[in-house]
Amino acid sequence: MSEPVSGPPFEQPADFEFTAENLERAKAHIAKYPPGRQASAVLPLLDLAQRQSGGWLPRAAMDRVAAILDMAPIRVYEVSTFYTMFNLRPVGRYLLQACTTTPCWLRGSEAVVAACKRKLGIGIGETTADGLFTLIEVECLGGCVNAPILQVNDDFYEDLDGAATERLLDALKSGTVPPKGSATGRGGSAPFKGKTALTEPPDAAVAAGWTRNPPGAEKQGEKEDAG
Ligand code: FES
């Protein structure tokens, strides 16, 4: 179950305006939809507003999006409170989203979450005192093939265990952002124990000297062709 970010009281900015650059981006999103359907651009506009605001969505930003799209503010609040991608209070520089849905859980997400808690000294929904990390728990991120997944801001870190998670957090703390992707070097969604498809021999079989065709198979085929 996803839990919202918690923390001490914070101040909402009094107003919000898109930068000139983001306003152009917002107009480009709105132009993708027919006249009268500009509300369809609410998600990309909220995303723009959140990025401009340092990773969270102030109330004033939601109101500005509502005004631009000619929507009732409550309709925009409904969207921003539904999706976990929107943060309604300030978050750390690195937003850690730990997936704990079944495939990630079966592949060790508990160790990933435990490593985050142990290393950072925070619980789910909390932010470190230095403002570097916020940890939240999320539902399936759509990367189950390389589970377990920890999303850091926009990037997926995959095939993690406790030790790999601690190394990742150490690197981020020291100001280094490690390459995203599989911690084990697995390419794409290849089986983690090597190939298992019958179209190519499994790695273990190759090591044992096996080939796709058993000895004599070619001769048998030749005989059949000749017959
Ligand atoms: S269950 Fe974690 S990415 Fe799908």
Image: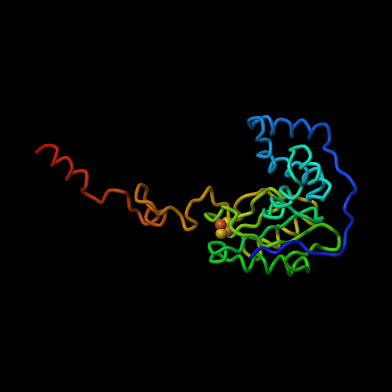
Q: Is residue 82 above or below residue 117?
A: above
Q: Residue at x 74, y 34 (%)?
A: 26
Q: Position of residue 144 (x, y in %)?
A: 54, 56
Where the C terminus falls, by quadrant?
top left
Q: Nearer the viewer, residue 152 or 205?
A: 152
Q: Position of residue 120 (x, y in %)?
A: 77, 65
| Quadrant housing residue 97 | bottom right
- Left or right position of 107 against 52: left
- Left or right position of 63 against 213: right
- Asked whether residue 32 appears in the rendered view, the answer is yes
| Quadrant housing residue 127 | bottom right
Q: Is residue 112 above or below residue 62?
A: below
Q: Is residue 217 above or below residue 116?
A: above
Q: Residue at x 13, y 41 (%)?
A: 224
- Asked whether residue 147 appears in the rendered view, the answer is no
Q: Position of residue 153 (x, y in %)?
A: 72, 50
Q: Position of residue 56 (x, y in %)?
A: 79, 51
Where the N terminus falls, by quadrant?
bottom right
Q: Residue at x 26, y 51 (%)?
A: 214
Q: Quadrant of ligand 1?
A: bottom right
Q: Nearer the viewer, residue 182 or 84?
A: 84
Q: Residue at x 86, y 63 (%)?
A: 129
